[in-house]
Image: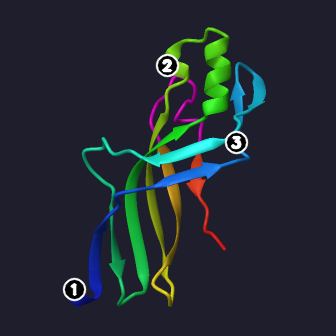
Amino acid sequence: MRDSRIDFTITHLKAHVDEGVTIEWQGRELASGPLNIELNQAANYGNNGELDYGKRRAHADFRVLLSFPDFANLLESLGADPSLTQPVHAAICSDGRILNNHSFKLSGRCELADHALLNSEETKAFVLPGT
């Protein structure tokens, strides 16, 4: 049944979340401002997936960079350490169903790498299914 499976490579991803997220930093809750998500082209692995038409399921693993440009600019203007303003490296592992029009609804966990601003043990991120 291998014929019903198609491997693919993710070559482009760019997303923008206007609402951003709430960041707790030094005991205070701060709005991050808009959040940008881009495919990490420099990742030496990942950024691929599989469509299993026999099961009508899709799976994708990919590496992304999360950036908070407004928050980073604020930290920079305050003279904060440059490591705080760097993008956050993350790995997304997502699964979902293949729809009749061949699109897919993916959701799953997002593993954040250690970052000067975020503690990966205390910070959780998920890709929620779309509508």
SS under mark 1: helix
Tell me where residue 41 appears, x and y as whole percent.
33, 45
| Segment colored magenta | 112-123
Q: Which residue bears the numbered disc 1?
A: 2
Q: Is residue 93 magenta?
A: no
Q: Is residue 122 magenta?
A: yes
- Confirm or deny contact between disc 2 and disc 3 (CB under 8 A): no
Q: Which residue is mark 2?
A: 83
- Along the polypeptide, which appears first: circle 1 or circle 3? 1
> Could you tell me the amino acid type at mark 3?
Val
Secondary structure under badge 3? Answer: loop
The dot on residue 21 is 3
Which one is in front, 120 or 69?
69
Query: In the figure, is residue 38 to the left or right of 75?
Result: left
Amino acid type of the residue that numbered disc 2 sits on in the rendered structure: Ser
In this rendering, the label closer to the viewer, 2 or 1: 2
Work out whether mark 2 precedes mark 3 in sequence or the reverse, and give the earlier one: 3
Indicate the secondary structure of the residue bearing disc 2. helix
